[in-house]
Image: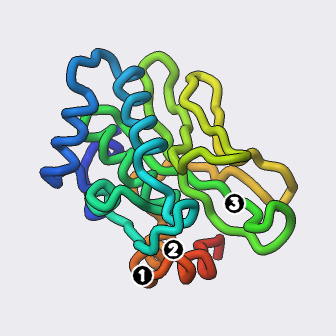
Amino acid sequence: MSEYLRPSKYIDFDDEVVRAKAAALAAGLHGDLVIAETCYKFVRDEIRHSWDYQINLVTCKASDVLKKSTGYCYAKSHLLAALLRASGIPSGLCYQRLSVCDSGAPYCLHGLNVVFLKGYGWYRCDPRGNKAGINAQFNPPHEVLAFPIREPEECDLSGIWAEPLPEVIDVLERYSDIADVLANLPGLT
């Protein structure tokens, strides 16, 4: 479980700003469930999805996502993992393979989180941000993710990653324009 509790280059809750935000979000709260839900709602609702809001800024590290208040799904999941880990709640990353155009090729990865809750075990949640047609919620033990699996070529990738996938990092660090990220979304190789 320790790998889901430590800071890293991208899940950098050792950053002073991230630690302070995690402490502020958890202030006065008791129990992993309520702290996890508070962190989740903050990232989902207060950190804007770069493409949805057309914010031409690409972030990757949790601290940058927090400081800039924006990120793609992958970057937002890095921030949620960092906030949860800073509060002593084990958290990892997970991914879905989804159709980019709602049906058929091309396909890309979608990033979300998995959190270990004492009363439920590992629970997936999706902080990408809600909009028309997307209504992700934090409702353990029921998963209410942004995107359901709808066709045979789509899938939930098995596994819980302590660190972001290399192909995700590659895209987020290579491109500085959100349109370039959209044109090169990470996929399965």
Q: Marks 1 and 2: CB-CB under 8 Å?
A: no
Of pointers 2 and 3, the one earlier in the residue sequence: 3
Q: Secondary structure at mark 3?
A: strand
Q: Secondary structure at mark 2?
A: helix
- In which quadrant of the rendered image does the C terminus lie? bottom right
The Cα atoms of the two marked residues, 3 and 1, are separated by 23 Å
Farthest-out residue, left: 16
The answer to which of 164 and 36 lies nearer the viewer is 36
Of pointers 1 and 2, the one earlier in the residue sequence: 2
Figure check: 55 above or below 16:
below
- In which quadrant of the rendered image does the N terminus lie? top left
* Label 2 crowd bin: few (<14), some (14–19), many (20+), radius 10 Å: some
Decide if residue 59 is on the left or right side of residue 108.
left
Of pointers 3 and 1, the one earlier in the residue sequence: 3
| Residue type indicated by callout 1 | Ser
Residue at position x 44%, y 25% in the image = 117
Q: Is residue 116 visible?
A: yes
Q: Which residue is mark 3?
A: 97
Residue 160 % position (x, y): 50, 48
Decide if residue 147 is on the left or right side of residue 167.
right
Q: Which residue is mark 2?
A: 167
Q: Marks 2 and 3: CB-CB under 8 Å?
A: no
Q: Which residue is mark 1?
A: 176
- Color theme of the render: rainbow
| Residue type indicated by callout 2 | Glu
Residue 126 % position (x, y): 55, 43
